[in-house]
Image (cartoon, rainbow, N blue to C red):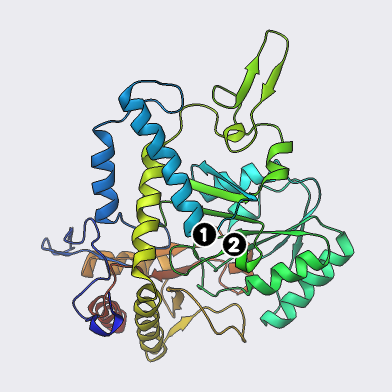
Amino acid sequence: MSTTTLDHSVKALAAIEGSDTQAPLRDGSTTRYVNFDYAASAPALCSVVERISQLLQTYSSVHRGAGYASQVTTKAYETARGQVADFVGAGNEHCLIFTRNTTDSLNLLARCVPGKVVVLDLEHHSNLLPWNDVHVVRGANTLAATISRVETALKDTRAVLLAVTGASNVTGEILPIGELAEIAHRHGARIAVDGAQLVPHRRVDITATGIDYLAFSGHKTYAPFGSGVLVGLRDWLDAADPYLAGGGAVLNVTADDVKWAPAPARHEGGSPNVLGAAALAAACVEIESLGDAVVSHEATLTEQLRDGLSEIPGVHTLKIFADSTDAVGVVSFVVDGHQAAEVAAHLSAEYGIGVRDGRFCAHPLLDRLGHGSGAVRASLGLGSSSADVDLLLAALRAL
C-alpha cells in the first residue's frame, strides 16, 4: 500500500477486528469506540483471525502424532517459527522459543543468564523484576549521558548482559539499540532487548543490529492469542535448566535420569500454543507486507497528536530524554487540575475514547519524571486515523 494514497482522515492502514465497536456513553447513547490503547493490547488483524479460523479445521497434537491433522498442525507450528524468525532477521546461530508474552520470555532468559545484568530505571517491570543479579542504572536527562552511564556500569560491574527496552512504553522514545549493542559487546557483555513496544511499529533486524536476545508479545503485535517470543543465541538457552519440565522437553527419561532436548524444545514443555504461534506469524507476515507505510502512518498521526496536545493549555506531555528524536506512537501526558483516572474516565464516558491511565508498569520512571501518581497514555496503531486524533484533542480541549 502506497503511503501517498493513504487518507489518514478516514482510512486505517490495515483491516482490524472490532473497528466498528460501539461504546456506551454517559447520556445513554452509543458511539464508535476510539482505541488509543494499542500499547497495552492491540486488536487483532482480520487476517490473523482468518488464519486462526483456517487452522482450527485441522487442529491437533504437535510433534507426536502420525495422523493427517497432527501433521498439518505440526507443520503450521514450525512454519510459524520460521516466519517469525525471518520477520526479526534471525540467523542460523539464533534459536526462537514461543512463550506466553514478553514477561514470560524475559523470565525464561533470566534463568539462563550466567552472571550480572545491567538495566535502566526506565524499564517496564517485566525487564526490571526477573533478573537474579541486577545493577540498575539511573537514567540521565539526555540519551548521551545515559549511554555513558550504561557503559560505565558495564565496565565496573563486569556484567554479562545489558537488558534494555527498544522503545519506552511510557513515552515511545526509541533507544539507540545498535549503539548500545556495540558498547555491550565491547565490554564482553551481550544485549537483550524488550521489543514489546518496538517490534509492532518498526522493523527490527537482530542480526544487522547486533541484538543477542529479543523478546516481544503477540498481543501487542495484533495477534492477541496468548503468544510471545524469545529469540537469541543458543548457547545460554541450551546450557540452562528447562523453563518448563515436562513432555516435549526431553530426549529420554528413565526412572533415575533424564536427558533434556536442546532449545527450543528444551523450554517448550507441554502442548504448545499452536494457535498463538500461527496468529503471531500471520501478523508478522502482514506487517512486513505493509513495509514503510507502517512508520509513515504512525509518524504522521503521532506528530498530529503531539502538536495538538502542545497547544492545549494545562496539558503537559512526558519525555525522558531532552535529546531524543525518534519515537513510536506512544504519548503520555498529564492535565493540570485533574487526576489521570479522572481524565481517562471522562474520555470514555463522554466520547467513547479508550486510553490508559496509571503508572504503566514503570513505577521508577514515573517517579523520576515527577508523576508518581500516574499519567494518561494515548497510543496509536494500524487502525488509528487522523479523525481519531482530532476527536481526542477536542475532548481534551473541552475538559
SS under mark 2: helix
Q: Residue furthest right?
A: 156
Q: Nearer the viewer, residue 380 or 215?
A: 215
Position of residue 213 measured from the top left corner of the image (x, y, whole percent): 64, 55
Q: Residue furthest left?
A: 29
Distance Cα–Cα, label 1 vs label 2: 6 Å
Which of the 4 image quadrants contains residue 399?
Answer: bottom left
Tag 2: amino acid: Ile
Which of the 4 image quadrants contains residue 395?
Answer: bottom left
Position of residue 90 measured from the top left corner of the image (x, y, whole percent): 56, 56
Whichever of labels 1 and 2 marks the residue nearer the N terminus, that label is: 1
Asked if the residue at tag 2 contacts the one at tag 1, i.e. Cβ–Cβ closer than 8 Å, the answer is yes
Tag 1: amino acid: Val
| Quadrant, the N terminus | bottom left
- For the point 61% across and 67% down, the residue is 208
SS under mark 1: loop
Position of residue 79 measured from the top left corner of the image (x, y, whole percent): 42, 43
Residue 222 at least partly seen: no
Q: Residue furthest top?
A: 255
Q: Nearer the viewer, residue 314 or 60?
A: 60
In the image, 161: left or right of 6? Answer: right
365 versus 248 height, above or below? below
In the image, 150: left or right of 231? Answer: right
In the image, 280: left or right of 147? Answer: left
Disc sitting over residue 130 in the figure: none
- For the point 70% across and 32% down, the residue is 241
Q: Residues within 10 Å of mark 1 (few under 14, many from 20)?
A: some
Residue occupied by mark 2: 206
Residue 74 at least partly seen: yes
Residue occupied by mark 1: 88
